[in-house]
Amino acid sequence: MSVLDIVFAPSEVLSKKALVVGNIDKAIKDLVNNMFDTMYENNGVGLAAPQINQSLQILVMDCSSKDNNYNSTVLINPKIIIKSEGFQVHEEGCLSFPNQYFEVKRPEFVKVNYLDIVGKRKEKIFNGFEAVCVQHEIDHLAGTLFTSHISRLKRHMILKKMQKFKKNLNKPI
Ligand code: NI
């Protein structure tokens, strides 16, 4: 399996709606394994397929990695079917925005309908930090970035920082 390159914002693939997965074949299963490798290698707690330049409705997450207790989850074609009325505010980061962290307000819990890795339809309630993570990643599949949850001024500031970051990446040493 392999660690894939992360797409940094701003990028077109991060801003468009990802395609629904039809058949969960070997290529999709390999992609999911590579997404886990890429997420763990980068110390992430979640990763959506557009972040590795695949415009597909797939996300992987593991919110328990901080206590060395692996709880890897893959969600294919996920849809939020219930949102709580209550909200929580949590500091978020994103592998497509290195070193950018800020508070985002989201529903406290959500119920999600999705396909698992063998194509079985499931429903699950995500709470607490898992709810933060799953909502952040499902946003990615709609082309929505966590910067869309903050003020326009702050969003503009972060966009400028990211443009500078990407420009420096391409500079010869
Ligand atoms: Ni993200």
Image (cartoon, helix red, strand yellow):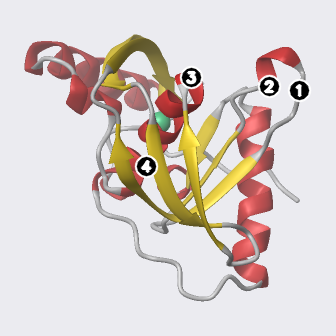
Picture quarter containing residue 108?
A: top left
The kind of secondary structure element at disc 1 is loop
Q: Residue 111's x, y, as percent?
A: 46, 47
Q: Which residue is mark 2?
A: 65
Residue drawn 77% across and 72% down?
A: 29
Give the CA distance from mark 3 to mark 4: 14 Å
Give the CA distance from mark 1 to mark 2: 6 Å
- Is 102 situated above or below 146? above
Which of the two labelled residues, at mark 3 and mark 1, occupies the earlier sequence position? 1
Which of the two labelled residues, at mark 1 and mark 4, occupies the earlier sequence position? 1
Question: Is the C-beta separation of discs 1 and 2 under 8 Å?
Answer: yes
- What crowding class fits label 1: few (fewer than 14 Cα within 10 Å), some (14-19), or many (20 or more)? few
Tag on residue 138? Answer: 4
Give the CA distance from mark 3 to mark 1: 15 Å
The quadrant in which the C terminus is found is top right
Q: Nearer the viewer, residue 9 or 144?
A: 144
Which of the two labelled residues, at mark 3 and mark 4, occupies the earlier sequence position? 3
Give the CA distance from mark 1 to mark 4: 23 Å
Question: Is the C-beta separation of discs 3 and 4 under 8 Å?
Answer: no
- Is 114 situated above or below 12? below
The quadrant in which the N terminus is found is bottom right
Name the amino acid, label 4.
Answer: Ile
Question: Is the C-beta separation of discs 1 and 4 under 8 Å?
Answer: no
- What crowding class fits label 3: few (fewer than 14 Cα within 10 Å), some (14-19), or many (20 or more)? some
- From the Cβ of disc 1, is ligand 1 less than 8 Å away? no
Name the amino acid, label 2.
Answer: Ser
Give the CA distance from mark 4 to mark 2: 20 Å
Which of the two labelled residues, at mark 3 and mark 2, occupies the earlier sequence position? 2
- The answer to whether residue 146 is left or right of residue 48 is left
Question: Is the C-beta separation of discs 4 and 2 under 8 Å?
Answer: no
Q: Nearer the viewer, mark 3 or mark 2?
A: 3
Q: Which residue is mark 3?
A: 129
